[in-house]
Every structure is written in structure tokens, then in C-alpha cells.
Amino acid sequence: MNMMSEAAVEAAVGAKTTAQPPIKMQGRLVNVSYGDNQALFDVDLDVRLHQVTALIGPSGCGKSTFLRCLNRMNDTIEGCRVKGSITLDGADIYDPSIDVVELRANVGMVFQKPNPFPKTIYENVAYGPRIHGLATGKAEMDEIVETSLRKAGLFEEVKDRLHTAGTGLSGGQQQRLCIARAIAVSPEVILMDEPCSALDPIATAKVEELIDELRVNYTIVIVTHSMQQAARVSQRTAMFHLGRLVEEGATDKMFTNPDDQRTQDYITGRYG
Amino acid sequence: MSDAVTPPAAVAGTGIQKRDIGIKRRYAAERRFRAYGLIAIALGILFLTALLYTVISKGYTAFQQTAISVPVTFSEKIIDPKGERAQNPQALMMANYPVLARNGLVRELGIDPKNKKLVSAAGKMLSAGSRVQLRDMVLADPSIIGKTLPVWILASGDIDSAFKGQVDLSVDQARRQVDDQQIAWMNQLAKDNILVKRFNTGLFTYGASSRAETAGVGVAIIGSLYMMGIVLVLALPIGVAASIYLEEFAPKNRWTDLIEVNINNLAAVPSIVFGLLGLAVFINFAGMPRSASLVGGLVLSLMTLPTIIIATRAALKAVPPSIRAAALGLGASRTQMVFHHVLPLAAPGVMTGTIIGLAQALGETAPLLLIGMVAFVVGVPASPMDPATALPVQIFMWANEAERAFVERTSGAIIILLGFLAVMNITAIILRRRFERRW
């Protein structure tokens, strides 16, 4: 599936400012409607490998809708229709030959509100690898769980209580548990839908730090309401307004010298 | 620290301003509403207490039964006068066992065996159930023939009622079931501890009988248990499967709306209609046996299904969508999502709904009348295909009996039924408490 050579990946990670990294996911003329309400109009957006792409814009602008198109979570919503093409490594994810379960194993998701399963911490992380058959034995599963929790920066805090309820953790820990759970199935892309909106500033800082570390191994798309957060964690930013993509570009440029007046107004807090 | 320096701030105004915003009226309304609530609860408790008091005060005596210890001589002359039992085993079946019991009592009371009238009166103090009891003893061990053994024989229903003080002795003896002579004997035997009240195990083991002292809810309990088993085996899986399909898989369109409306309506259909349906479909069309707990179980399953479906759907709906999103987001299939996450979380609600549905089915009478479960069944049903009755039907039948001894049995059976219902409801509450998860 991944056609890139290792050298290209290396180059992509290393090249932060010089050459553009290759495109991981690409949306072309994406139109989404819920029943009679059209939520997205002709959105063209590229998500680049090993970068954090932030989707910003006022409430109801369609940024979450676009995010949910990327792993077809919109399929679960009654009356939702998606038109246009979205590709992952060049393959159309809405093609009938693509299995949605396989897609979601490759494009993981972290939700707005931490939603751990009401099971133990261990079970939360082990669930994904288990249903996909990624571990052959207990030892291998233990390793996946530990690695995932380490990558999510949670292992040290919970290593003594892996078999206690995941719902007993604090909000920030729960969200990092959800990130560990998403990482455990080794996805290529992680979608985050306002992952810090239910967290306090300290937990937010930890999650943001984590996002920056995860970028090395994964491609991340994040929806956020916080301009500062978009500026801090992302390399590219896309501004949505009323279902249309207003502007997309390098985060530095978007926040210092946007082309569009609406972007300028939004990031300076004039509306939104 | 510097408060000595800063002058105290002046207090604005002159206390809380009095405004006419209807505060008195609002408090009065609240007090009134609380009073209504208290009155409603008090009335409820009053009626419940009255109900329990009537049932228990009338019924507790049914759990005791008067028995007489009679020295029975298993005389060969009476059991097998022709000495043919070796060739003809039927002889032991046909023997006149009540006479053995009567003769024993006559001897105990010291009555002249020649006095036919007194002997007959004494014999009527004993239950005719002695026939079966003594026959079974002889059949089990024929060597007791010729010996004399003390046997606890049930007193007749009338003596039992009289001994429990339920017969008005001020009435002229010609107009009551027990005459003064029998009362005198009863008191004499009671004084010698030969006639005593013992725990009534027969109430739980006997089947139907026209004699109150040998009538019990044994058959009815077995029939009810068979039916509960059938309802559980049929209605629970079908109901849960239907709810899962409707709630998690079915597209939301006009057809599923129609099905939902129909299920809700089915829950409100009078139960007797289900009885008619069972009569027409299971007995007349499918040719299943009448009075069988199998048919009863099928009918009650149909009746319980809507309850279970509604409860299960409510329980599934109560599982937060975020759990579903989390599972799907990890790449779980819809079936995995339901069976790994949603159903386990909904299980306490499903169990509660099922138990309440079962309790409802246990107390149901009307549909069972229509499929012939209102039958006089003496023998314990060996399988659900055999004729049986059900607890509430047994209560219904006993309530139609005239004898005084059946009145206490009716209430006694009601206590047993209420006991079962209480156990089931308490189980439902405990299950819900124990397995309820918070998220």
C-alpha cells in the first residue's frame, strides 16, 4: 500500500521547510450532505506525509465533517452522502473494493471527548490488535500494549495499574489512553477531532507535545478550535468557512500573512 | 494586613428590597404539591398493606395441615382376603385401604366396632387420601402386611378447618360438616398429641384434588417452571436478536418505523387475545396437545417478546454513541462493535427487562384458560407435552371451590405466587445494581 521507499520517508521527515513531503491523503471535489443540508462544497485538500495538518474554522464550517470523511466515519450517520474522491496513498477510499474495516485500521481516530471502553487500561489498548489479529501470543500483546502506552506517554503513569478500569483515569490520561489505543493498531494516519477541547491546559500541553512526537511515525490531521494550538502543533493549516475551504497553506504563512481576508479575521478573533 | 488603613466600604441600600413576586403563592403551591405526593404514597402503602394483610392472614394456615397418628394394622384379611397377591398383583392395588386407617382410629378412640354409625363418623375424620398413602406403603414393602405401624394420616379437610378454628361451632351441628361427637374426638386426640398441626409439605407436592387436604400446587409449580423455561429459551434470544437488528443494523425508514409501532402495540394487546391466537395456531393448526405447558410457554413467549424487545432496545439506546464510535474507529466491524461493547454494556438492562417480562408471564392467567390449562391434573407432568396447570390458574380454580379448606389454600397459593414474583423482581434489582456500569 505504501509505495514510498524508506529514503523518501527519511527525506520527508527531514525536509521541514525545503521540499514538500509527498501526499498521504488527498481530497478532490469533496461534497458532503446530510439529508438536504449540504455540509461541504468542492473541498480540495492534501494531507502530507509525516506532517500535522490542522483544520480550523468557526463552528459548523465542515471541518469535522471533512475529517470524518477521511476514515469514512460518516458512513455511520443516517442520510449522509459523500461525493468526490478521497485517496489514501493513491487509492480511492470510497471505492467499493476498499473494505471500510481495513481503511479504519489504517486511518485511526481520536475523538473530542475521551471515550475509553469501560474495561481495563490493558484491554482498551489490546482491543484493536486483538480484533485485527496483530499479536500471536500474550507476550507479543503485552509488548504492543506497553509500546503503545509508551508512545502515548502514558506508560509510566499507569504501569502499576494496567488492569484497573480505563475510565478511572483523569480526563487527560483518558485522552492519551485513547491515543495509545489508536496507535496500537499501527495506523498510518491518525485523525484527531478536537482532542483537547475537554482537557485542562496542563493535559492539553501534554497531548500537544505528544502530537508533535507522533508526527515522526504517523501522519496526523487535527481539527481544533484553538488558534494557538493549530499554530503550535501543525505544519499545514486549512481554514474552512461555511462548508468551503477558504485557504490552505503552511501554518507559518497562514498565521502571519494569510491570503484571504476571512482567514485574517478569524485568526485575529474578529469572528468565530 | 492593611485593613486597619483602608476604611470599610459603605453598604449600599437598606436591606433586601421587598417586591411582590408571589413568593408566598409559590411556596404554597410547592407545599400543596408535596402534600398530594405524600397522600398518594400513603394511599399506595395503605392498599398494599391491606392486600398483604388479607392474603397472609387468610393464607398462612394453609402452610399447616392437621394430621393424626393412627396405629394401622395392615391386616391381611382386609388387604388380600383371598390370598391371591402372589398371582395377581392387582389385588394390592384394589384393596380397601381406608378401612385399615378407619379401624386403627376406631381402636385408638375406643369405639365399639359394632356401632356402625360411630365407626362411620370416625372414618370421616380421616382423609380419603389414606388410600393412596397406605397403598404406596404396602406396594413399597409388602412385608408390612400383618404388622401394626403408627402412620401419620391427614385429617379430613373439615376436621382440619375445625381444628384451625375456622368452623363456627355455635351453629347447630346438623347444619355443619363436623358434628359434636367428631369435635369431642378431635379435642381428645389433640390433648394426647395424637392429632397435631404439621408443616404442609403436600401443598407443594400434590396435584389437583377434589379433597382440600390432598390438593396442592405441585403440578402448577412444575407447569409454571416448564413455561418459564420455554419463555426464557425462546423469547430472550429472539427478543434480543430482534432488538439488536432493529437498533444497530436496520436502516431507519418507513418499514422499521412501522415495525416499531407494531411492537409497541403488541405490548398493549390484551393477553386473552394471545390465548386465542395460541388456540388457533398451536392447537388447532399445528395440532399440539391441549393443556400442555409447551403451548402455554409458546403463548407466553409471544406475549413476553414485545416487553423484552422494548426493554432491550431502551438498554441499547442508553449505551453512549461514543463507545460505538470508539469501536468503529479502531476498525471493528459492526457485529464486533455490538457483541464486544454495546451488548455487554446493555446486558443489565436486558436482564432486568427479561426478568420483568418473565414475572409478567408467570402471573398471566387469561391466555392459559383458552388453551385448556385450566384442567384437573393429578399427576406431576413429566415433560412439557403433558397436561399441566399454572400457579395463577390453580389459584383461579381454587377460588371457585366452596369448601372452607380451599379458601385458605387459595390464599396460600397466592402467597407462593407472590413469593416467586418477589424473588424475581429482587433478582432483577440486584442484577441491575451489580452490573450497572458508569461511563
Image (cartoon, helix red, strand yellow):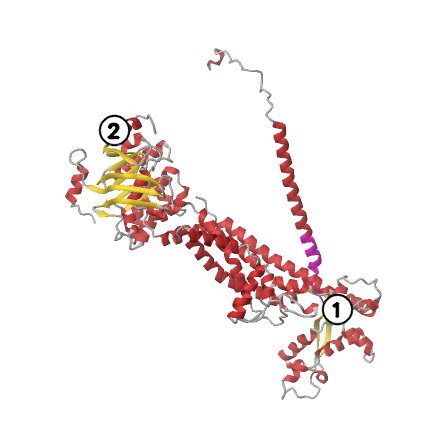
Q: Amino acid at mark 2?
A: Asp
The spot of residue B81 in percent (x, y) is 71, 86
The spot of residue B361 in percent (x, y) is 56, 59
* Residue placed under numbered mark 2 in the picture: A260
The relative height of residue A82 versus residue B244 in the rendered view (above or below) is above
The spot of residue B126 in percent (x, y) is 74, 72
Q: Amino acid at mark 1?
A: Ile
**Quarter of the rendering containing residue B399:** bottom right
Q: State the extent of the magenta-drawn residues as a range.
A: B51-66
A180 or B343, nearer to the observer: B343
The C terminus of chain A is located in which quarter? top left
Query: Mark 1, chain letter?
Result: B
Question: What secondary structure is the magenta-colored segment mainly?
Answer: helix
Q: Secondary structure at mark 1?
A: loop
Q: Secondary structure at mark 2?
A: loop
Distance from the alpha carbon under mark 1 to that under mark 2: 108 Å
